Image (cartoon, rainbow, N blue to C red):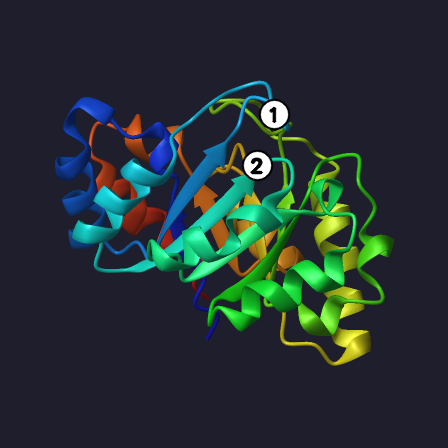
Amino acid sequence: MKNTLIAPSVLAADFANLQRDIEMINNSEADWFHIDIMDGVFVPNISFGMPVLQAIAKHAKKTIDVHLMIIDPDRYIKTFADLGANILTVHIEACTHLHRTLQAIKAEGVKAGVALNPHTSIDLLEDVINDIDMVCIMSVNPGFGGQSFIENTYAKVEKLKALIVKKGASTLIEIDGGVTNKNAKQLVEAGADVLVAGSYVFGAADPVTTVADLKKLTSF
């Protein structure tokens, strides 16, 4: 039985009612909280920083999956670990010494993730895949929610899955961007383990039912 993890993206929540939306995720069938930290430099948008993550962590009852879309992430690894991140994902494009960064994350007792932008090749992970707990494939260009899904993602997931199997790694595959009920099943069939859904969940009339439907659709 394939149990796909659903990770609603808090970036799409109502910031004026953040606690309400956090409780909604707590009470839904969602598995993780996906939290995007953006610096306005690595991506052309600024999201939220440490105080908001701290506030979320205080109420969240599920795994906190923090996605750092920032330059020089090494400077903040300890800070985000201390604030409650269970998984810390850095962008390969922002890391000069990826292996060192992964070791630094794990030294804080946190799982290490690596995110790849749409143009970045899976081949770059060949030498470090056994050190990575999760690879986050960006299926939109990072920075803004509500974008259209990039179709090449399916082939990329299949290629990554083949690499994981070849190397005997236990790395999870996460998809971030444009995930809906139209592509979720196909992504899981290609090899995805975790689906991040932002505006699709929070923009729904009934987010709890939307999460439950996504979970049912992708667990087979």
**x, y percentage for residue 212?**
28, 51
Could you give the CA–CA distance between mark 1 and mark 2, rounded to whole angstroms? 7 Å
Label located before the other in sequence (1 or 2): 1
**x, y percentage for residue 116?**
70, 44
Residue nearest the viewer, comparing 149 with 134: 134
Residue 186 in sight here: no
Could you tell me the amino acid type at mark 1?
A: Val
Question: Looking at the image, which residue is at 24% across and 26% down?
Answer: 15
Vertical placement of 17 versus 208: above or below? above
Q: Quadrant of residue 210?
A: top left
Residue 182 in sight here: yes
Q: Is residue 158 left or right of residue 73?
A: right
Residue nearest the viewer, comparing 97 with 17: 97
Q: Which residue is mark 2?
A: 69
The disc label shown at residue 155, or none = none
Whether pointer 1 and pointer 2 mark residues with C-beta atoms closer than 8 Å, the reply is yes
Q: Indicate the secondary structure of the residue bearing disc 1.
A: loop
**x, y percentage for residue 55?**
22, 43
Question: Looking at the image, which residue is at 46% across and 75% down?
Answer: 1
Within 10 Å of disc 2 (Cα), the crowding (few <14, some 14-19, many 20+) is many
The disc label shown at residue 43, or none = 1
Q: Indicate the secondary structure of the residue bearing disc 2.
A: strand
Within 10 Å of disc 1 (Cα), the crowding (few <14, some 14-19, many 20+) is some
Vertical placement of 9 versus 40: above or below? below
The residue furthest bottom is 168
Q: Quadrant of residue 204?
A: top left
Q: Quadrant of residue 123?
A: bottom right
The residue furthest front is 75
Could you tell me the amino acid type at mark 2?
A: Met
**x, y percentage for residue 38?**
50, 31
